[in-house]
Image (spheres, rainbow, N blue to C red):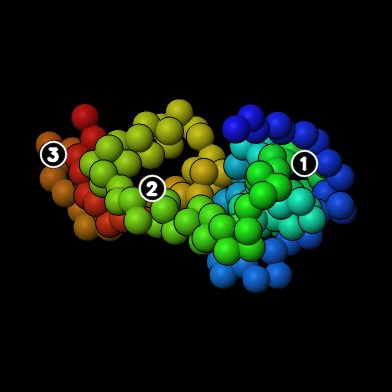
Amino acid sequence: MTIIIKTVAIDSLTPDPDNARTHPDNNLKAIAGSLETFGQVKPLIINGQSIVLAGNGTLQAAKSLGWSEIEVAQIPAHWSWEQQRAFALADNRTAELADWNSEKLAAQLLELDAVGWELDNVGFEKLQPPTEELPTSKRRPVTCPDCGAEFVPE
């Protein structure tokens, strides 16, 4: 199967009216921040009627940024409605089933924070040091606000 990516007018697309996934404000803010920072690096997935099966949050965030065009890839024309629905659900669910390696996540967030990266643009909050005072001879642990992992930076 060859996948063709093309640029289309955002107004030509229809958000999936049966999308089982919701996009609260913090999610849309993170998606918009990612789009502003990195641009669009993966296409929305649409069917032959230009209904977005995967990327509804990206579509909404791109609209909020005032984009007029976006890249899409179309699923095979022979897919049944059931295949389309199953794909849309799988696209949303598979990432949810993964776990974070909290130590690696916290180390990477700390590293990005240390060089001034806007963590909001990748969906995370700025790291906050613990509130309790530690002896100055000891390094202070840092707690990841999203996963709760605590580690001591080197």
Three-letter code, disc 3: Lys
Q: Earlier in the sequence, mark 1 or mark 3?
A: 1
User: Which residue is disc 1 drawn over?
Assistant: 70
Point out which mark residue 138 bears: 3
Mark 1 secondary-structure assignment: strand
11 or 154, nearer to the observer: 11
Q: CA distance from mark 1 to mark 3?
A: 50 Å
Query: Dot 1: within a 10 Å radius of its alpha carbon, few (fewer than 14), some, or many (20 or more) residues?
Result: many
> Mark 2 or 3 closer to N-term?
2
Label 2 Cα neighbours within 10 Å, binned few <14 / some 14-19 / many ≥20: some
Q: Give SS at disc 3.
A: loop
**Nearer to the camera, 131 or 143:** 143
| Position in image of residue 86 (x %, y %) | 52, 60
Query: Is 2 placed above or below 74 here?
Result: above
Q: How far apart are the alpha carbons under marks 2 and 3?
A: 19 Å
- The residue at which mark 2 appears reads as 127
